[in-house]
Amino acid sequence: MYKQSLVKTVEPIKKTTITRMNRGKKWKYGYNKEHDLIVLSHNGVIGEIIEIQNLVIALPKPPKEVYKHQKNKWVKQEYPKELQRIKNIFDWRSYPEDQKEKWYDYIDEEFKRREEGFWFMNNGKPTWITGTHYMYLQWSKIDVGAPDFREANRLFYIYWEACKADKRCYGICYLKNRRSGFSFMSSAETVNLATISSDARYGILSKSGWDAKKMFTDKVVPISVNYPFFFKPIQDGMDRPKTELAYRVPASKFTRKKITSNEKLEEIKGLDTTIDWKNTGDNSYDGEKLNLLVHDESGKWERPDNILNNWRVTKTCLRLGSRIVGKCMMGSTSNALDKGGDNFKKLYNASDVTSRNKNGQTKSGLYSLFIPMEWNYEGFIDEYGIPVFDNPEGDVLDPDGELIDIGIIEHWNNEVEGLKSDQDGLNEFYRQFPRTTEHAFRDESLNSIFNLVKIYEQIDYNEGIGSSANISTGNFQWVNGIKDTQVIFYPDPKGRFKISWTPPQHLQNKVILKNGIKYPANEHMGAFGCDSYDISGTVDGRGSNGALHGLTKFSMEDAPPNHIFLEYVARPPTADIFFEDVLMALVFYGMPILCENNKPRLLYHLRRRGYRGYSMNRPDKLWNKLSVTEKEIGGIPNSSEDIKQAHAAAIEMYIQGHVGHLGDGNYGDIYFNKTLNDWSRFDINKRTKFDATISSGLAIMACNRHLYRPNAKIEKPKLNINIAKYSNKGNASKIIKK
């Protein structure tokens, strides 16, 4: 049975508090700082509170009477034929006044739905859609005519409404699957906002100028053309322009004010609002004020175009000083990482709502959203717009009345099974129809120096078993806060360490003391590798992470052999915190560490605290061949080409033997997908970018140091064996003198 994790109902506020504030209608639309949620209600009253990808959103409370169509689902309402004959505000002005009166309530209701959203019964359940979603369903023309109602789109629009309502947010970064409808939905929103705005600018970008133009001419313009007269301002220029859609004379406000035929055209103030598109480039829309920027196919910008650089520029177009005045609607599937996908991935990760600065903003300013493919895959959505996850037990019909006899999960698994022999084909399928973000950013196998097939086999296996169940997150600390005593591990969801194994109690904190120097007592069980850093902060704030990995050896102890049991990839506020984190892990496990010595502060920290015995010497040199510094603090240099090659070979050896499918239905037991993904992207010529790879490779080398032991040249002394020679002439033998 499939269990969705995209959306859930939460109760972050006491019910009594909600009731009290509802009674006074005190909930204001927008971000509520006191309760840390976003309110989408316009009448001061809230209902259900939901969480979508860590964003907490308060929905409006259902009214006493909810609209119900006879089919008990969303059905687009017919546009009255009498009004269809009215094409613009000028036709309406000439319309008989007594005929106008009977349509004012209808028009006002449409405006209300546009602003506040719409409640309707869907399969017996009161369902709310945002005003933007209503405009998309009721008044937007797409390639198949009228859009279907889909629950996935409802959640998308709710999240987007929250982005608009939150004054801290620059917009949405939407990681999507193929044919999810984003291009039409964003086009509909562009027209919706532009037709109620004055003196505003709306822009469109895509993976190429041609794609942006096509979106404008094939989606935006037709939606605008087919708006009803009371929503559609008068355009300047051509009915179906190619470069710019300009709204000059508004219709809406004057319609609602019941314009009389006596008013003169000159008295009507123009909107002066435009929608246009730009060619793809880093400086597109540079210096221009935008109310909305649509970024379509942003995960497919290929060199020299760079979505990261463009966003840094266009972000400034959406603000005046510190005040955000416009929003960005960004959505895309991802290309292979070296074909634009990597930059989009960085932007998506920088939009995580759980990671904010002191101003409450994410690193990018955007809010990331990923809707798994099973929510929005054509052919597996029932007549009520609800995805069919599992195989149906009874008759389930799609919107066209066709029978759905299989669930999307089984269908997707069948597709994956058929592509197992074609890794690149499988990776492309994952990118197009991802169930996880890992799928969405899956890379091509030909770009890696390691065996990507085995790496991705392991990632898929981990996701299938829910590897998080095998991992504990937390931190280490000294008992009672007293340093250099004993260390304990305590769980913490926000902890820096991820561990999958701890030694039995009697093997924890084991240390050997020799001449005042501490040595690890469990060296026979395993070792650590570390990629350290020396500077707490950097000028741009983007310093690399510190990384630590632990790996077991084969031993007679109660420990899983060849198991990467610890992953640490983090950058605490200061380097000293990182050093102490590493030290505590070493003490807890009682294992040594192999660390690069080009950033020596960690190694000096260990020596100063009496733990020089925990720092391994480079395994490729004998003691008498080490430099003075290497004898003092240990470690291994990263400058040698031989070391770089040996490091990569160590990881390759480990992957071949212990990662992915191992035969007979068995798989490796490395559960850290962050490390696996780092391996998949590793570039030996740009090693500094891959903290987890450097660290894990050093751990593997540390556990296999016998492979790197040099063959010492033994100078054998020349044997001087003097064998005496004798002469046997005569009665007695005589020695022959030289």
Image (cartoon, rainbow, N blue to C red):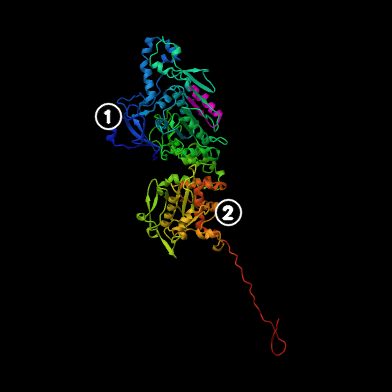
Q: Residue furthest right?
A: 729
Q: Is residue 586 magenta?
A: no
Q: Nearer the viewer, residue 20 or 429?
A: 20
Tag 2 secondary structure:
loop
Residue holding disc 1: 23
Main secondary structure along the magenta-highlighted residues: helix
Task: Give the residue type at disc 1.
Answer: Arg
Measuring 42% from the left and 45% from the top, which residue is drawn there?
466
| Residue 192 image-quadrant placement | top left
Q: What x and y, as percent, mark residue 605? A: 46, 55
Residue type for callout 2: Ser
Q: Which residues are magenta?
A: 201-222
Q: What separation in Å lies between label 1 and label 2 (alpha carbons)? A: 72 Å
Q: Please report the residue visible at 69 percent of the width from the left and 89 percent of the height from the top.
A: 732
Q: Which mark is residue 8?
A: none
Please determine whether, in this image, residue 622 is positioned above or below residue 364. Answer: below
Q: Which residue is mark 2?
A: 640
> Where 72 falls versus 606 (above or below)?
above
